[in-house]
Amino acid sequence: MADLTGPESKLQKLILTFSEIATKACPDLDKIIWAADAFGFKGDEDMKEGATSFLLSGGQGPNARPSDVTNSIHVNCDTEYDFEFALTFSLDERLTDYVIRTALFNHLGLTAINDDGTATLNLGGADFTVRHWVTNRTFGNHAFLLQA
């Protein structure tokens, strides 16, 4: 379990990637693109200036290994939320939802957890909901979300 959750694990790299991009750039779309680029994420060549939703892919995080699975970032400003940032990824199926969510929330310093498993993070005077979402348990697919 230490190999799956320790300081050099993929989980910790993903938490760092989410934290560095989401807490330092969101909800500024240009800053997100710039910050994500530093982590190896690239957008579509046709991504137009002024876009309110986009996909950035290819990010492996710092110190990537060839065996790491490609991750992606989705940003939407045209959903049921005014703003939604998602880092999607795959992890070893042995990691439970609780372990993943707890590691993320601990890293972000979030201690007040809501009954629905979310927490509130204040960025620049605005409250955002932080959520860990299991997109496919069988294949170990997950997302870290920041929503407003």
Image: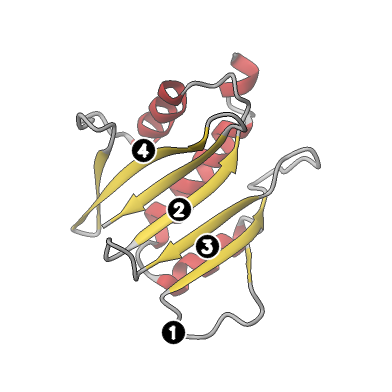
Q: In screen coordinates, is 23 left or right of 148?
A: right
Q: Residue at x 81, y 42 (%)?
A: 66
Give the CA distance from mark 3 to mark 2.
14 Å
Q: Are marks 3 and 1 in contact (CB under 8 Å)?
A: no
Q: CA distance from mark 4 to mark 2?
A: 16 Å
| Disc nearer the start of the sequence (3/1) | 3
Residue type highlighted by circle 2: Ala
Do residues under tags 3 and 2 come within 8 Å of each other at their CB atoms?
no
Q: Quadrant of residue 103?
A: top left
Which circle's residue, 4 or 3, is located before the other in the chain? Answer: 3
Residue 29 vertical position relative to residue 12 in the rendered view, above or below: below
Query: N-terminal of the two: label 4 or label 1?
Result: 1
Residue bearing the label numbered 2: 86
Q: Which residue is mark 3?
A: 35
Q: Does residue 114 sit above or below 27 in this rendering? A: above
Quadrant housing the C terminus: bottom left
Which secondary structure, mark 2? strand
Q: Position of residue 45 (x, y in %)?
A: 66, 79
Residue named by callout 4 = 108
Q: Amino acid at mark 3?
A: Ala
Kindly report which numbered mark, 3 or 2, lies closer to the viewer in this rendering: 2
Viewer-nearest of labels 3 and 1? Answer: 1
Q: Residues within 10 Å of mark 3 (few under 14, many from 20)?
A: some
CA gap between label 4 and label 3 equals 18 Å
